[in-house]
Image (spheres, rainbow, N blue to C red):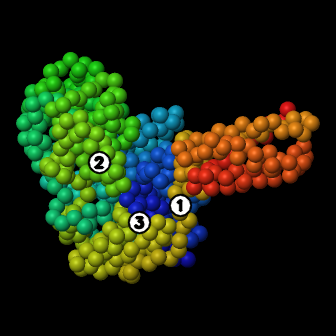
Amino acid sequence: MKEELLFCPLGGSGEIGMNMNLYAYGTEENQKWLIVDMGITFADDSIPGIDLIYPDAGFIIEKKEDLLGIVLTHAHEDHIGSIVHIWPKLKCKIYATPFTAVLIQEKFKEKKIDITNYLKIVALNSKIDLGPFKIDFVTLTHSILEPNGLSITTPVGVVLHTGDWKVDPNPLIGNKVDEKKLRAIGEKGVIAMICDSTNVFSPGRAGSEQDVRESLLKIISNQKKRVLVTSFASNVARMESIFYIAKHTKRKISLVGRSMHRIYKAAKQCGYLKDVIEPLDPRDANKIPKENIIYLCTGSQGEPMGGLNRIANEIHPDVNLESGDTIIFSSKIIPGNEKKLYALQNLIVKRDIEVITEENAFVHVSGHANRDDLKDMYKWVKPRCIIPVHGEHRHMKEHISFAKEMQIPFNLKVENGDIIKISKDQQPEIIDKAPTGKIYLDGKIAVGLDSLSIKERKNISINGLLEITLIILNNGKIKKPIISFRGIPEEELSETFKFDLEDQIIKTCKSFAVNNFNQEKNLIDTIKHNCRKIVKEKTGKRPFTNVNVARI
């Protein structure tokens, strides 16, 4: 049987975030598999109680005996965040460059999992051999340290998996895009490029961290009181810029938020941030005159537990702001976060604290390739085929239109679960479909969207909770039921509301032989139905109803 090269995204195609991609090579009876990235996405308010969502990896878990390893392109959560949840079911080798490896180690330490024998640290710009896959790490630029493209050589040909990237002429920390290596890869021939689509609608270039530094320096130099900068903790170049600006404006700097400290320590451990001034503990920063301090803080997306949210609500134990201070949001708004972020900014403005964002000043550049950056990559690599990933369907469709403008011979729009055959001489084609889905982290438990816990929580959040305790004596008599409710609108309820419920419960019980245990389920279901009906008539809500039966 003929050997084939396959590609299959399990996450990140048709959506932003949750990136997880599979490659396979071999015959149907003898295929070897490779995973590139294992990311998460964050839940919104439509799924109460859920923080993290990650791809259902059941398809590759079933093939773990033929899995050669996990290769990570970089350390953003949408590329590594699910590894601690999925890896224990795989127990394969993990390949990552030093900075990514440090953050991976920290994740597993928190879970008390020892991966010493599985984590393989890959030097920048080096190569690894995994069976039929010869993988060459290519230095790119992004909004985090050590972003890598992967040049994957197979018996069929070379595939370039870009990961997340842009062309930054002055990245400040780390090397520039390795244009020479990309051109050399292109000269050998690239049969397919699996490419980031995030900013395909954005004209021009994504911009440089150097330009952001210069703009922030001007802005902060003009501030007379405290300055707080909030940004993505993972953007070490931006972090280094704030240290640089603190030194040049003769201010001290203090890091606020667990993630900010974690990234700072990881960067230092890997040899970055060598020449920055020493940050102050937030408790000591309180003693510094207000005109001499900069805080660098987590919470740029309005996260409820982020440092900035606690500061804005005046509940942070160590950081206090007052009228005339300035907060700079050196970040973009991730789609879906607009509502909570604008609410946070309005709260800050009400306190007479100045708010500076990308809407009114140049304080941020994206980490993803704009159209001119994409043009450069296409010119260097000259791929025979483009398969867009890392985008919603609208991004990937536009990316295909762009590829046609760039005269790429073949293209293919895919979605999670598509199994694509990539060959040297033909158009790539979808030949099968893998089972896909999303796993929701509910507290510490991984569940599916149809989980009873999620359904019940949604119901309670929308309709409220009605709790009924029914006490049945040995002689079959019914004591007065105990009724409580939460989340049901009360202002319009008459004083007879509870009496109506009590009467209905007693009436229902009389129609059952309450001492017949075989009838208990039917009794409970009937009480639920009748009481929900009364509440619906009175309030318009059909609450989640729980009936407890106590026998004395």
> Label 2, label 1: how many angstroms apart (C-alpha)?
32 Å
Instruction: Tell me, yes or no, whether the two marked residues, 2 and 3, touch with CB atoms within 8 Å.
Output: no
Which residue is more in the foreground, 299 or 178? 299
Residue of label 3: 14
Query: Residue 198 versus residue 136: which sits nearer the camera?
Result: 198
Q: Identify the residue position indicated by label 2 in the image.
A: 342
- Badge 3 element: strand
Question: Label 3 neighbourhood size at 10 Å, few (<14), some (14-19), many (20+)?
Answer: many
* Position of residue 120 measured from the top left corner of the image (x, y, whole percent): 42, 44
Outermost residue toward the front? 495
Q: Residue at coordinates 90% horizontally, 39% vertically from top-left?
A: 476
Q: Position of residue 433 (x, y in %)?
A: 53, 71
Front residue (pair 357, 85): 357
**Left or right position of 174 against 110:** left
Residue 542 higher or lower than 309, as above or below = below
Q: Mark 1 points at which residue?
A: 437
User: Image quadrant for the C terminus?
Assistant: top right
Tell me the number on the disc at residue 247: none
| Element on which disc 2 rests | helix
Three-letter amino acid code at the position of disc 3: Gly
| Sooner in the amino-acid sequence: mark 2 or mark 1 | 2
What is the x, y in percent for residue 240?
Answer: 19, 38
N-terminal-most mark, 3 or 1 = 3
Quadrant of the image occupied by residue 37: bottom left
Residue sitting at x 49%, y 56%: 55
Element under label 1? loop
